Amino acid sequence: MRQNDPMPVNPPQRRPELVALTGLRFAAALGVVAFHLRGHLTALFPGLSGLDLALSAGSLGVELFFVLSGFILGYHYLDQLARPGRGTYRHFLRKRFARIYPMHLASLLLLALFVVVMARIGRPVSNPEAYTMPSFWANLALVQCWTLDDCGLSWNGPAWSLSAEWLAYLAFPLAAWTARFARRGVLLWSVIALVVVGQLWTTEGSGLHGGIPRVATTFLLGVLLARVHLDGVPRLRWDAIAAWSVAVSIGVSVALAQSGRSFTVVIPLFGVVVLALANAEGHGLAGGLTRTLSGARMRFWGDASYALYMTHALVLAAGAEFVRLEIAAQGSLASRLGVIGGYLFAILLVAAVAYQEVERRSRRWFRSSGPGGTPGRERDQQIAQSTPT
């Protein structure tokens, strides 16, 4: 090696893909889509007002993404990033940037083009306060939600969580060091308990709803649980634990939402869901959930879930300008169902195209233009799939 050559960066250790967690990402993305579609459903079907409250629990899909992201990145990178060298940290951030930014940039620019075109034809979009130039630059730099208080929604609204996620990537060595410090046993579980208490205080008592508090505890919880997983877990009925934790999470959050109460108390259960699915084997009746999440279709949509998350709001924004729900609500049951079906079809179609033509192409470009210009596949594709948002 010549003296001026860069030091080689050790790739993350190859570990088995946690297939069920890929399908779980799609389920989380669907929850967020349902949350954003609830207004359309109640406008078209006024008799389903209770459904609006129930679907509001789908917003927790973002917190599930944060826990899942921390877990997957911890699963692959804890050893490398607990004591990172400059090259290792730079390599990590480059891969994270390559994973999230092309889709973010494409969706932001597409939405900006739509806003400009609508203004030029004399039909300015609704909620113009969400499309200001200062907020555009903040979104472009992915800093729009580096706040303690609610940062609001601007431009491509779901990108608020991407801003928070990027901050978590920048701070990942600190999370990895925490997991290394609390390596095993009582100390590790004590730190996890403190993180859970902090998360509950943040969401239930503090009134802090910005990107920093929402990502900090959930992402760190995922990283710490990855340490638990890597250290080895007891042989339990993980399939049954996964099925029950998912059922309880959904049932309790929906029940609380329908009663008008805060439903964020279920967020710590997401850690149980992720840890259980990471260790489940898909055996027997209780393994039905694991087998479903590991199926080929769920794996495809799990891969495409980031595109789904980042593009569905664009479809809804375009639809708001051309579909008049108050008029559609006067139509027949079949026509109203057709409107909802049309939205779902368009959302999934745009997501699939964006995944194939933007996300996968940009990932290949970043791989081929990496250090040394050596093309190649990711050693473990799930590392590239760990972005929840």
Image (cartoon, rainbow, N blue to C red):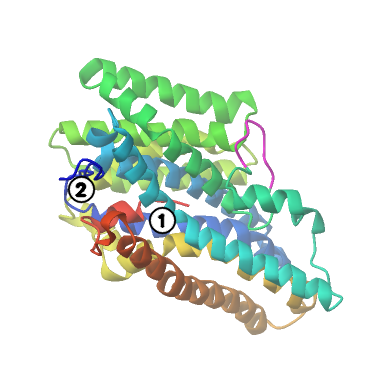
Residue 273 located within the stretch drawn in magenta = no
Q: Which segment is the magenta one? A: 145-152
Q: Is residue 21 visible?
A: no
| Residue 288 place in picture, x, y as percent | 25, 58
Q: Is residue 367 visible?
A: yes
Up-down relation of residue 355 to residue 65 (above or below): below
- Residue placed under numbered mark 1 in the picture: 98
Element type where label 1 sits in the image = helix
Up-down relation of residue 337 to residue 287 (above or below): below
Please count the marks in the image.
2
Q: Residue 280 carries which label?
A: 2
**Side of 96 where 61 appears, left or right:** right
| Residue 46 place in picture, x, y as percent | 72, 65
Furthest-right residue in this view: 122
Camera-side residue of 89 and 330: 89
| Residue 79 place in picture, x, y as percent | 22, 34
Element type where label 2 sits in the image = loop
**Side of 219 where 342 appears, left or right:** right
Q: Quadrant of residue 111?
A: bottom right
Mark 1 to mark 2: distance in Å?
31 Å
Image depth: mark 1 or mark 2 in front: 1
Q: What residue type is labelled 1?
A: Ala
| Residue 136 place in picture, x, y as percent | 69, 54
Q: Which residue is drawn at 15% across and 45% down?
A: 1
Q: Residue at x 23, y 52 (%)?
A: 18
Q: In which quarter of the image is residue 155?
A: bottom right
Sequence-first disc among 1 and 2: 1
Main SS, magenta region, reads loop
Q: What residue type is labelled 2?
A: Ala
Camera-side residue of 163 and 197: 163
